Image (tube, rainbow, N blue to C red):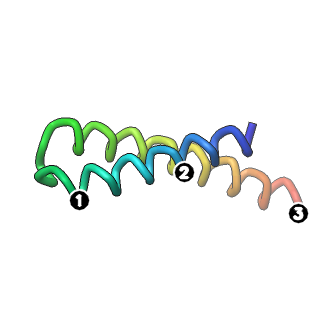
Amino acid sequence: MEKKLLRRIEGLRKKLNKFGHTDNLIDSKVVEVSQQLDCLLNQYQKIRTYRQLSFW
């Protein structure tokens, strides 16, 4: 699951980078992709935190 999440994060990063070079940063599609990326990064952080806590 973690690898799949990382692939999705990387895909959105690339998409956001592309939009950032071609579109206005406040364009609705740029904001939408940014919010999706934020959500996935938050999920990933929760997974990593849980894994660290369960280690102890």
Give the percent coordinates (x, y) of residue 21.
23, 59
In the displayed structure, does residue 14 sit left or right of residue 53?
A: left
Question: What is the number of the mark on residue 10?
Answer: 2
- Amino acid type assigned to the residue bearing label 3 in the image: Trp
Which element type, helix, strand or loop, lies under badge 3? Answer: loop
Marks 1,3: beta carbons within 8 A: no
In the displayed structure, does residue 36 sit left or right of residue 8?
A: left
Quadrant where the N terminus sits is top right
Give the percent coordinates (x, y) of residue 28.
15, 37
Circle 1 is placed at which residue position? 21
Q: CA distance from mark 1 to mark 2?
A: 17 Å
- Amino acid type assigned to the residue bearing label 1 in the image: His
Give the percent coordinates (x, y) of residue 40.
51, 43
In the displayed structure, does residue 6 sit left or right of residue 42?
A: right
Closer to the eye: label 1 or 3: 1
Give the percent coordinates (x, y) of residue 15.
38, 46
Q: Earlier in the sequence, mark 1 or mark 2?
A: 2
